[in-house]
Image (cartoon, helix red, strand yellow):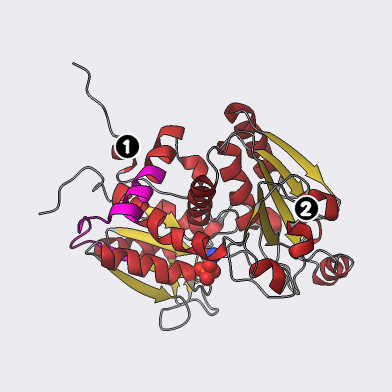
């Protein structure tokens, strides 16, 4: 007799820092569990469990969906906003802490881990030195000092919870993802936004065997290590990756348009040069005209989005827009993730 093992059992007690932390079987099982929760509901699988949510930066969807998810699963979420009622935290080792930060991660994280069953962290890059930020120092500090699972709620490099929701949204709308055309398109924005979302979006698409096209103006290349991972994943999953620099033709034949704004890593830390480069590409705004060039494709964006800056009203309000469904799916995939990391995926509630 053969016994079937649940791939989610192996996630118990682990961190979730990027989608590439998951094997194909684990990723598949997580999306299946999220789909089940969404369709049929669930029992209070996290009764008595506590999630500590540490926000170094603002959020609407991430904060609300994690808190709602913990409540729906019978648990509780503690919202800790650093610098707003919570001490400012230092993450650098060997620092003389005579500045703003009153506490170091070395104490704060293990203390929180004594109160909480899971910790989740949002920590955007500071915009100063990409060679430092690309090591994700704050998230890495949490992972190092925590004795309970750590979930990345968006760091310098990745937004993997968004990527899980993106994958679920794509799977719901396409019968198969294999060889479908996924277009990540750069959009204009008044600020140099981080690259975590585009990184995670293409990483997720690269796991699904999609034909990925990344369209951006020259100078807005994604991190080379991330691109190497995307290419390796695509090769393994039967997909492909190309980079293009023409805005209008990027939409031709697209099944999925993933619109996203991000800053130039080539000018990271040099605000004036980065802004001057970005200002040259004010035509990169997605509207109905562009969506009509797709192969009946649908439009994704992680939100928040500035109307008529990155996406025109007629794009966001058109029949192709999946942005609200995409945001809803944050709730479902995160509930599956929380249950799996807490080791409750296979258990019956009391
Ligand atoms: N997409 C997303 O993470 O939204 P928030 O920044 O509002 O959490």
Residue sitting nearer the eye, 23 or 327: 327
Is residue 267 or residue 159 the one in the foreground?
159
- For the residues labelled 1 and 2, the Cα–Cα distance comes to 43 Å
- What is the quadrant of the C terminus in the image? bottom left
Residue at 79% over, 43% down: 243
As helix, strand or loop, the secondary structure at mark 1 comes to helix
Q: Is residue 80 above or below residue 179?
A: below
- Magenta stretch bounds: 31-51
In the picture as drawn, the residue positioned furthest to the left comes out as 350
Judge from the rendering whether residue 207 lies leftward or rightward of residue 108; answer left or right: right
Number of residues whose C-alpha sits closer than 10 Å to that of mark 1, classed few (under 14), some (14–19) or many (20 or more): some
Residue 38 magenta: yes
How packed is label 2: few (under 14 Cα within 10 Å), some, or many (20 or more)? some
Some atom of ligand 1 lies within 8 Å of the CB belonging to the residue at label 2: no
Question: Per the image, is 154 magenta?
Answer: no
* Residue at the spot 57% in from the left edge and 53% down from the top edge: 158
Q: Quadrant of residue 270?
A: bottom right
Give the quadrant of the N terminus: top left
The dot on residue 339 is none
Q: Which residue is labeled 2 in the image?
A: 293
Q: Which mark is residue 10?
A: 1
């Amino acid at each position: 007799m053969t016994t079937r093992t649940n791939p989610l059992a192996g996630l118990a007690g682990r961190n979730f820092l990027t989608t590439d932390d998951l094997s194909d079987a684990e990723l598949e099982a997580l999306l299946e569990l999220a789909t089940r929760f969404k369709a049929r509901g669930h029992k209070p699988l996290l009764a008595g469990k506590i999630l500590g949510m540490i926000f170094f930066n603002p959020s609407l969807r991430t904060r609300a969906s994690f808190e709602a998810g913990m409540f729906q699963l019978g648990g509780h979420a503690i919202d800790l906003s650093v610098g707003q009622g919570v001490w400012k935290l230092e993450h650098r080792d060997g620092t003389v802490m005579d500045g703003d930060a009153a506490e170091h991660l070395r104490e704060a994280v293990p203390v929180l881990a004594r109160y909480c069953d899971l910790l989740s962290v949002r920590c955007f890059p500071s915009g100063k030195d990409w060679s430092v930020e690309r090591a994700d120092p704050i998230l890495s500090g949490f992972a190092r000092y925590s004795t309970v699972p750590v979930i990345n709620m968006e760091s310098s490099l990745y937004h993997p919870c968004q990527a899980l929701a993106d994958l679920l949204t794509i799977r719901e709308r396409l019968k198969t993802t294999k060889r479908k055309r996924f277009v990540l398109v750069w959009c204009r924005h008044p600020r140099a936004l981080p690259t975590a979302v585009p990184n995670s979006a293409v990483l997720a698409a690269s796991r699904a065997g999609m034909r990925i096209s990344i369209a951006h103006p020259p100078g807005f290349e994604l991190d080379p290590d991330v691109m190497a991972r995307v290419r390796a994943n695509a090769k393994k999953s039967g997909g492909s990756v190309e980079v293009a620099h023409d805005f209008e033709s990027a939409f031709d034949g697209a099944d999925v348009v993933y619109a996203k704004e991000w800053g130039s890593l080539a000018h990271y830390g040099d605000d004036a040069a980065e802004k001057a480069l970005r200002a040259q590409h004010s035509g990169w705004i997605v509207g109905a005209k562009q969506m009509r060039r797709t192969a009946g494709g649908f439009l994704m964006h992680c939100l928040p989005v500035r109307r008529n800056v990155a996406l025109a009203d007629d794009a966001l309000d058109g029949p192709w827009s999946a942005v609200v469904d995409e945001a809803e799916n944050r709730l479902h995939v995160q509930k599956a993730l929380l249950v799996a990391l807490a080791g409750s995926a296979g258990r019956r509630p009391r």
